[in-house]
Image (cartoon, rainbow, N blue to C red):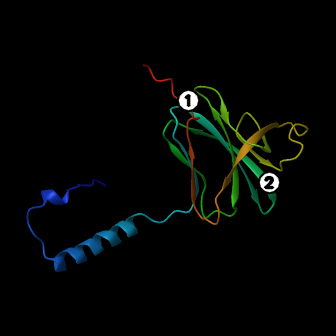
Amino acid sequence: MSTTVASFSSIRRRVPAAQVLPALTACGLALLCATPARADLRLCNQTGSKVGISLGYRDPQGWVTEGWWDLAPKACETLLKGALAARFYYVFAVDYTRGGEWSGRSLMCTRDSEFTIRGNEDCLARGYDRNGFFEVDTGEQKSWTIQLTDPNRADPPAKP
């Protein structure tokens, strides 16, 4: 779908308001119909690195962790499709390019290869790794996008 943008100063001909309103309404309805509303949990990698993502959440049967989603730099991925069923989600991410990770205090089970793990207890005894996930509070929203960004770095001192 291509788009043309024209500033008001570039339009020279006056169009009666009675013609503009129906046209704008029709355009607005066409845009609403063309893009269905989505209710998903998405994660966008806003870094310059390739990253690996693992996700933890509670479903009706208990705790679940899943991974790995590999995201290219500046890419987004849908982690869960449909309306969010929980308020809190947990993320652990690894920077494949520069090293390092995005982590938190909520300990959950992971493994090096693709996984879906039920339960977050006794990770090591069950043959899994244990990593700290950071918490994402989605409030009462039915859709949420997590933005993964580069860590804040101090600016170099100003030169005299």
Disc 1 marks which amino acid?
Answer: Ala
Picture residue at 77% right of the left edge, 43% below the top: 105
- Mark 2 Cα shell of 10 Å, populated few (<14), some (14-19), many (≥20): some
Among all residues in the image, which is located at the extreme front?
A: 160
The N terminus: image quadrant: bottom left
- Left/right of residue 142 with respect to residue 16 in the rendered view: right
Disc 2 marks which amino acid?
Answer: Trp
Q: Tag 1, which secondary structure?
A: loop
Question: Separation of disc 2 and disc 1 at Cα?
Answer: 37 Å
Residue tagged by mark 1? Answer: 154
Q: Tag 2, which secondary structure?
A: strand
Q: Nearer the viewer, residue 159 or 58?
A: 159
**Is residue 40 depicted above or below 150 in this figure?**
below
> Which quadrant holds residue 58?
bottom right
Residue tagged by mark 2? Answer: 63
Residue 110 numbered mark, or none: none
Picture residue at 20% right of the left edge, 57% below the top: 7
